Image (cartoon, helix red, strand yellow):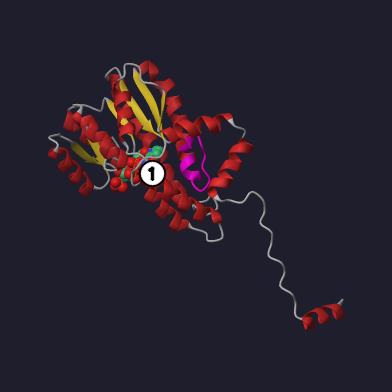
Amino acid sequence: MTGATGGFGRVIVLRLAAAGWDVVAGARDMDKARNLVAEAAERGLALRTVRLDVACEQSCRQALEESAEMTGDGPWALVNNAGIPQAGAVADVDDEQARRLLEVNLLGPARLCRMVLPGMAARGGGRIVNISSGLGRVPWPMGAWYSAGKHALSALTHCLRVEAAHLGIRVSLIEPGAFATPMLSRALNDLETVRNPANPGYTATTRLFTAVDRRVPGPEPVARTVETCLTARRPRPRYVVGRDARLLVPIHTLLPLAWTDRLKHAVTGLPRTPQPAAPPAPRPAEQAAAAKETA
Ligand SMILES: NC(=O)c1ccc[n+]([C@@H]2O[C@H](COP(=O)([O-])OP(=O)(O)OC[C@H]3O[C@@H](n4cnc5c(N)ncnc54)[C@H](OP(=O)(O)O)[C@@H]3O)[C@@H](O)[C@H]2O)c1
C-alpha cells in the first residue's frame, strides 16, 4: 500500500488491518509511519511499515524487498494510492513541477506494477488496485496536470488488466470524487506557489477548493471500495466513488465539449472571450500636435 500515511491511505490500511489483512504500509516519512503504527496499536491492530518514495526506483525496489522479508513472500495485492495534486494553470506549472507529478502519480504506480507482476504470476495470481480520480475523466482547468496524470494512469490500468488477466491478476481502477483529506489543502498551496495575479482562475479556484473542502465527506467509502477490490471474487474493472464523481463523470462523457467548456468557464471564472483591452491613455496635447507636425 503506497502513501499509507495520507488521508485515504491511513483509513485504508487501518480498515484492511482490522479485517485481518497482513498489511505493509509504504510511507515516505518514517515519523508519520511511527504515528500510524502507534494508532493501529491503540486499536489492537498490527501494522508493518516500509520507507517508500514512489518517485524513486531504488526506494520502490528496496521497499518490495523489505516487504518480502517481513512477510516471507512478495505481495498478493498492491494498492497504488500515493498521489500529489500540482494545481495551477498550464501556463504557470513548469517542467520540473509537471515531471514531479508524473513521477508520483504515473511512473511510480506503473513501476510498482511492473515490479510485482512476476511474483504474482509465479504465485498464480494477485490483485492490483490503482487509485485514480474522477478528474481523470473530467479534465479540470487549473488542475490540468493532475487530470492528465490520472487520465494516463487510467489508460495504463485498463491496458494492464487485459495484459495480466491470463496470469490470474485482477486489476481495478478507483475513481473517487472529492473527499476530506489533506489533498485539497495541498492543492490550495500549489495555487499560491504558481499563482499568476493576472489570471482570474486562481481566485475562483481557490474559492471553489475552499468551499469544497468544507463540505466533502470522509474517506471511508474509498477504503470500503479498496476492500471490495481485494475480496470480490470478480472485482469490477472500475469503481467511481462519491456522489460528485458519479454525477460529473457521466455528464462529461455525454455532453458536447462546447457545453462542458461553458460549465468550466462558469465555475473557474476563466473568461470565454478575450477581455477588452484598456482604452489608450489620452496623449497630452503637445504630443498630439508634434505627432500631427511629423505626419
Ligand atoms: N482526496 C480526494 O478528494 C481525492 C479524490 C480523488 C483521488 N484522490 C487520490 O487518492 C490518492 C490519495 O490521496 P489523499 O486524498 O489521501 O491525499 P493526501 O492526504 O495528500 O495523501 C497522499 C499520500 O501520498 C503520499 N505521497 C506523496 N508523494 C509521495 C511519494 N513520492 N512517495 C510515496 N508517497 C507519497 C503522501 O505522503 P506524506 O504523508 O509523506 O505527504 C500521503 O501519504 C491520491 O492518488 C489522490 O490523487 C484523492
The image shows residue 162, relative to residue 218, as above or below, that is above
Evaluate whether residue 9 shows in this view: yes
Q: Is residue 141 magenta?
A: yes
Q: Which corner quadrant holds the N terminus?
A: top left
| 139 left or right, relative to 50 | right
Q: Is residue 53 visible?
A: no
Give the quarter the ligand 1 occupies: top left
* Residues rendered magenta in the picture: 135-147
Q: Position of residue 27 (x, y in %)?
A: 26, 42
Residue placed most toward the observer, 113 or 257 = 257
Whether residue 201 is in magenta: the answer is no
| Residue at 61% in and 51% down | 271
Q: Position of residue 92 (x, y in %)?
A: 52, 54
Q: Quadrant of residue 171?
A: top left
Residue identified by numbered label 1: 215
Relative horizontal placement of residue 89, taking residue 23 as reference (left or right): right
Image-quadrant location for residue 52: top left
For the point 75% across and 80% down, the residue is 284
Residue 37 x %, y %: 17, 41
Instruction: Count the marks.
Output: 1
Residue 182 vertical placement versus 227 (above, below)? below
Asked whether 254 or 194 is in front, the reply is 254
